[in-house]
Image (cartoon, rainbow, N blue to C red):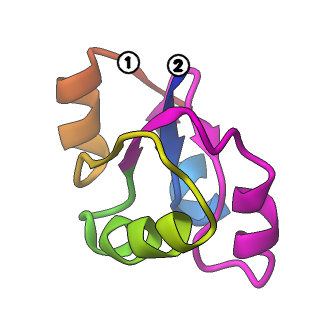
């Protein structure tokens, strides 16, 4: 099963810095459900946003869409960098 880091922040937030190699799908965008539905539903996702609040809302949506892998809330960017060991890049 594949493992991915998923950043669900806005493009403006991502432009300030993001984890190297993370997938980016803006939770606030009108097409969030459409874009998130295109991801591998069997994969594990380690997810972050600004503080973890949006991830807390995204996980139930992803479950409803049929995601069966592990969905982990890593909190904010700095927390996610520490948990994954990935560098923050611009």
Q: Nearer the viewer, residue 78 or 70?
A: 70
The residue beneath circle 2 is: 1
Image spot of residue 48 (x, y percent)? 36, 51
Tell me which corner region of the image, top left, top right, bottom left or bottom right, holds residue 56. bottom left
Who's the residue at 39% across and 59% down the image?
49
Q: Secondary structure at mark 2?
A: loop
Q: Which residues are magenta?
A: 18-47
Closer to us: 59 or 41: 41
Within-10-Å neighbours for mark 1: few <14, some 14–19, many 20+: some
28 with respect to 48 (left or right):
right
Q: Is residue 82 above or below residue 46?
A: above
Viewer-side residue, 29 vs 15: 29
Q: Residues within 10 Å of mark 2 (few under 14, many from 20)?
A: few
**In the depicted structure, whether residue 49 falls above or below residue 41:** below
- Residue 36, compared with residue 53, is above or below; it is above
Q: Position of residue 62 (x, y in %)?
A: 53, 65
Q: Position of residue 79 (x, y in %)?
A: 18, 41
Of discs 1 and 2, which sits in the foreground? 2
Quarter of the picture holding the C terminus: top right
Q: Earlier in the sequence, mark 1 or mark 2?
A: 2
Numbered mark located on residue 87 in the image: 1
Q: Residue 6 bears which disc, if any?
A: none
Q: Is residue 38 left or right of residue 5?
A: right
């Amino acid at each position: 099963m594949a493992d991915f880091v998923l950043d669900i922040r806005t493009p403006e937030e991502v432009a300030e810095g993001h984890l190297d190699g993370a997938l980016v799908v803006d939770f606030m965008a009108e097409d969030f459900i459409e874009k998130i539905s295109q991801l591998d539903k069997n994969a594990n996702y380690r997810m972050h946003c600004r503080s973890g609040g949006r991830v807390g809302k995204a996980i139930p949506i992803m479950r409803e869409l049929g995601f069966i892998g592990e969905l982990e809330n890593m909190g904010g960017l700095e927390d996610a960098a520490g948990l994954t060991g990935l560098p923050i890049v611009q």
